[in-house]
Structures are given as structure tokens and as C-alpha cells.
Image (spheres, helix red, strand yellow):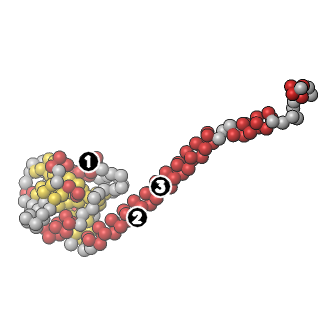
Amino acid sequence: MVYYFTSNAVTPAAFLYVGKDKVENEELIKYGLEEDFHVDNLSSAHVYVRLREGESWDAIPKELIQDCAQLTKANSIEGNKKDNVTIIYTPWSNLRKDGSMAVGQVSFHEPKKVKKVHVPQRENPIVNRLNKTKVEKFPDLRQEKEDREKEQRRKDRATQQTRQKEEARIAKERKEKAWQRDHAYDDLHSEEALASSSNQDRDADFLDDFM
């Protein structure tokens, strides 16, 4: 089971989701998406936010980060009882998982891509606002990931085809301009050659040159 939340702290609203337990967290880790955003540093609390196309994980509005941090704290048995906790967040693609790690445990490929947020205490207004949007679902995470990747490949192919058509158009245009430049005086030269070989416009005494 996965819990879904809606954050109205930003416009348009952002969608957050949390694994019910460490087993669900493992599925979220395994089948995350490149645009997911991971918040974690307390036991049994993994919160993700789906970024929109064009958004960057390191430019998330502070209001949304605060929602994620409060949700992480609230969904941690240990963290919910403590003040002054630190929440870390990183892109899903930076999560590293190997067979030696416990269920739900992760490390990071690049520590420089991990940011920290200090949470002084639980903010009930934020937690209550998010909890009012809570929805329980049983998603097929693998299928969702495959569908998203399939759609991304379709978009990539379409973008590549558009780029290739544009490159072909530019190449054709350059070729035509080069031909026009190289043959700009063809007609002029032909007219001059014709005029020089024609008797039509010559003086009546031009034959004197041959006498």
C-alpha cells in the first residue's frame, strides 16, 4: 500500500507519496522515476514528490520542501517524537541499493547531490493539511515505471525526428544557397557571350576590320 498526499503549498499542487512500511519503501526505491524526489533520514520514512516536466530537484520551492520534511518526520515513529531533526533529500537517480543493505536502506551514488533540511519541531497545521488529502492506493509500481519510460521513449523519438527534419531542412537550404551563389552569374555570362558573337548590335563598318 502507498499513501498519496497533495501539497497545496505550491501552485500547481504537488503530489507526494509514502510507503506504508519498509517493504513498500523497498518497492518505491526499486521502481522510482528519474523525476522523483526522495526525502529520507529517519527510520521507516521515505517520502517522494513527483516533479513536473522542466522542474529541477535543486530548485524546489521551500514551501514544498517544508511539506516533505514535515511529512517525513510525521511518518517516522522515531522522528515524530523528536525535535530538531535533520531531513535529507536527493533525486531518486542518486539512490544506491545493493544486496548487503537491509530492507528499506539506501546510500547515495554522489554525496554532493544530497541536501539537508533542519526541522525544529512538528508543525501540526502542515501535517493536518496534508493528512486531509491522504489517499490509500495499491499501485503496480513496476507497470507505472514501465509506462512512464515507454512514454518518455516516445517523446524522445518524436523530438529526435523533429530535430532530424529541421537539420535536413537547414542542410537543403544551405545547399540551395550555395548553388545560387556559385551560379549567380551564369545567365549574365551567357548573355555577354551571345552578344559578343552576334552581328546584330555591331557597327555597319565592322567588316572593315577584316579587309
Q: Position of residue 24 (x, y in %)?
A: 17, 69
Is tag 3's residue or tag 1's residue first in the polypeptide sequence?
1
Q: Quadrant of residue 126?
A: bottom left
182 to 81, vertically: above or below:
above
Coordinates of residue 13 in the picture (x, y in percent): 33, 57
- Disc 3 target residue: 164
Q: Between 141 and 49, which is closer to the camera in this rendering?
A: 141
Pick the front one: 26 or 170 = 170
Q: Residue at x 63, y 42 (%)?
A: 180
**What is the three-letter code of the residue carrying label 1?**
Asp
Q: Earlier in the sequence, mark 3 or mark 2?
A: 2
* Residue 156 image point, x, y percent: 39, 59
Is the residue marked by circle 3 packed among few (<14), some (14-19), or many (20+) residues within 10 Å? few
Looking at the picture, does residue 102 appear above or below residue 79? below
Q: Would you name the residue on which mark 2 appears?
A: 154
Give the foreground label among 1 and 2.
Answer: 2
Around disc 1, counting alpha carbons within 10 Å, would you say few (fewer than 14), some (14 to 19), or many (20 or more)?
few
Q: Which residue is mark 1?
A: 58
Question: What is the C-alpha distance between the residues marked 3 and 2?
Answer: 15 Å
Residue pictured at 55% horizontal, 45% vertical: 174
Residue 32 visible at all = yes
